[in-house]
Image (cartoon, rainbow, N blue to C red):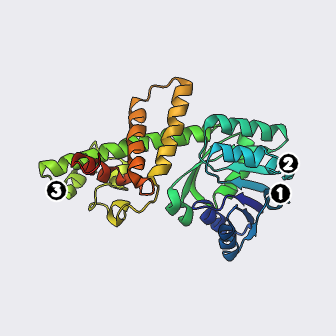
Amino acid sequence: MNIALIGLGNMGLPMAANLLKAGHDVAGCDLAEANRAAHAAQGGRGVASVAEAVAGAEVVITMLPAGKHVAEVVLGEGGVLAHAAPGALLIDSSTIDVATARRVAEAAESSGRMMLDAPVSGGVGGAVAGTLTFMCGGTESAFARAEPVLKGMGRSIVHAGPSGAGQAAKACNNMMLAISMIGVSEGFLLADRLGLDRQKLFDIASVSTGQCWALTSYCPAPGPVPSAPSNRDYQPGFAAALMLKDLGLAQQAAEDSGAPTPLGAHALRLYQALVEAGQGGADFSAMFRFLGATARGEIA
């Protein structure tokens, strides 16, 4: 297929690489010349304008920082809807608010084009490996068209429901992840104070009721899970600043819908403090290190 991918950042560039490996022709668009050059170096076509990227594209994928960027790129003058072919399928894999996702989808559908919101889980590692999870919102027919394309970049492709459902799923999932990461961090900090060996706690909790992904796959305490960021000085697989963004989206959705999320609200405050302490670029599991330093009085 002829595919346009707009947004060649940490996620978009490796996603484009996997589409190329799957045999697609990919026009990559990004504001940064270095990102366009990197896409060209991996076999794609690097272009500077949205209009050029979407010309002749059967599928247009956006991977952008926030809802305002998605709205501008899709709806704005010179944007996707102004230049994409009438039958093009639009897939937005950015993580944005539900309201914007639905607004953009309505505009796309009014123009005669299908659109999915399809945010991802799996981080940069999943983007590179082609093992992302896509949470998709849109019609059954749009999902059926998108699924073969998404399989070139992901391992699990889930149709969550109508427009906005993909973003809703991402907000709920990452709020739960943030809360569980804080809980696991607190458990290991308590174990340290009580003189309990970290590996022993891991061996017990990983097969007991404390078991969760934040423990078994991404343990925030250095030691038990060798592949976790905690064992490489919290170099990010998923940065704390991105978790803070997602928690903000979840709380916005909770306020709009009247959902009670007190732990989500508290998680947002803790991740805000972590980012304000200069750790926004560290992995979100650095919450363990941050809470320990705060308890020791190293962070006011």
Q: Residue 273, position in %: x, y? A: 38, 44
In the rendered view of the protein, which quadrant contains the N terminus? bottom right
Q: Disc 2 marks which amino acid?
A: Ala
Which residue is identified by label 2? Answer: 82
What is the crowding at mark 2: few (fewer than 14 residues within 10 Å), some, or many (at least 20)? some
Question: Would you identify the image quadrant in which residue 256 lies?
Answer: top right
Amino acid of disc 3: Asp
Question: Mark 2 near mark 1, Cβ–Cβ under 8 Å?
Answer: yes
Q: Which residue is mark 3?
A: 197
Circle 3 Cα neighbour tier, 10 Å, few/some/many (<14 / 14–19 / ≥20)? few
Q: Position of residue 202 (x, y in %)?
A: 24, 54
Query: Secondary structure beneath disc 3?
Result: loop
Examine the rendering and report whether any part of residue 163 can be seen. Answer: no
The CA distance from mark 1 to mark 3 is 58 Å
Q: Quadrant of the C terminus?
A: top left
> Would you say 201 lies left or right of 77 here?
left
Q: Earlier in the sequence, mark 1 or mark 3?
A: 1
Circle on res. 88: none
Question: In the rendered structure, which disc, 3 or 2, sits on the residue that comes first in sequence?
Answer: 2
Q: Secondary structure at mark 2?
A: helix
**Residue named by callout 1:** 51
Q: Residue placed at 38% from the left, 35% from the top?
A: 266
The mark that comes first in sequence, 2 or 1, is: 1
| Horizontal side, residue 56 vs residue 285: left or right | right
Distance between mark 3 and mark 2 Cα atoms: 60 Å
> How far apart are the alpha carbons under marks 2 and 1?
8 Å
Mark 1 lies on a secondary structure that is helix
Of tags 3 and 2, which is closer to the observer?
2
Amino acid carrying mark 1 in the image: Ala
